[in-house]
Image (tube, rainbow, N blue to C red):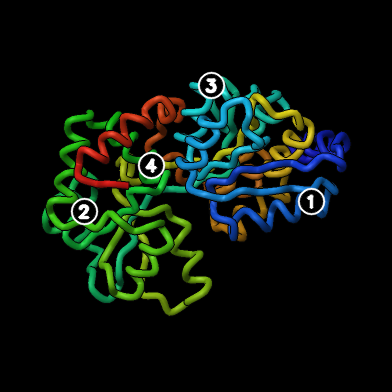
Amino acid sequence: STETAAKTALEQVDTSKTLVVYSGRKEKLIAPILEQFTADTGVPVEAKYGGSTDMGLLIAEEGDKTPADVFISQSPGPVGYLGDKDLLATLPSSITSQTMGSAANTWVGISARQRVLVYNTNTVDPTTLPASVVDMSKPEWASRAAISAKNSSFQDWLTLLRLEIGDAAAEKWLSDFVANGGKWDYGNNTSIVQATGAGEQEMGLVNHYYLAEVKAGDPTLKAENHNFADGDIGGAILLATASITKSSDNVTNAQALVEYLLSNAGQKYFSGATYEYLLTNNARAIDGKLDAFLNKVKIVNFDKLGSELAETLALIKRAGINL
């Protein structure tokens, strides 16, 4: 079980060795669970935060000299990119058997989220919103919508769009979105949700859980999520991931952290504090929310996201967006 596996890893930790974590997820989301891990295990953790794509590129640049032991990414693309460069360790079956992950067992999903369209409830009639994300590049929608082009979840989603409709059509979609007045320079999902709720923006493409996160701080926020039609690529599921670098000399502690993130304590944190979907077999048996929407969303080949990341970044540039 998850708990037994986590306990086994935790029993072997070396509290004299500091674990170095590179996180592409925000400090306010990840720091509390890392602190909880340290409190429960005695393992000191040093964390470096940045965008997931930037962190992945940094590890690639540092190569086998990277101080990072564990890389937590907002989405599969950056870890897949590192896996393709042979910079990630193969994870043991005690970890990979618990959850979704890469075919090569170099990363695992630690939580799941769905892509949605957040909209302002004062200015937008939800019954008029498009059933497919493909329509979002048309003038009547793009001129009112926002994306965060530098965000790794958007970049991974754009890779999925390329794989779904082809490179030429995906490039035209993004170019049209920009040409038709779509805003692309928001720094992250949170700022899109805040701007939408404040009426500065009418709608935006984001991950589902940001609305609940922002509403927790401001229950009066004038925003709701719109789901595209069942099976539409606009409602694809993406995974937050954890991986261990191949060059890590702190493997036991690194494995203990990944086990901890997959334990019931870790999963409870992700579903409670970050409003995400639970992902491990144990957690999904307790909370059926993920299975309920897995039946409705497009299941994608996560392994392709890493090898396609460079081409997606090039496509973004060709569409007139300078990250």
Give the foreground label among 2 and 3. Answer: 3
Image point (55%, 20%), residue name = 86
Q: Position of residue 318 (x, y in %)?
A: 21, 38
Query: Given the image, on which type of amino acid does mark 3 rest?
Result: Ala
Whichever of labels 1 and 3 marks the residue nearer the N terminus, that label is: 1
Residue 225 to residue 172: above or below = below
Q: Which residue is mark 4?
A: 236
Give the foreground label among 1 and 4. Answer: 1
- Relative side of 3 to 229, left or right: right
Q: Which residue is mark 2?
A: 130
How far apart are the alpha carbons under marks 3 and 4? Answer: 19 Å
How far apart are the alpha carbons under marks 1 and 4? Answer: 34 Å
Image point (41%, 33%), residue name = 299
Q: Which mark is residue 69?
A: none
Give the foreground label among 1 and 3. Answer: 1
Whichever of labels 1 and 4 marks the residue nearer the N terminus, that label is: 1
Q: Which residue is mark 3?
A: 103
Query: Given the image, on which type of amino acid does mark 4 rest?
Result: Ala
Query: Given the image, on which type of amino acid does mark 2 rest?
Result: Pro
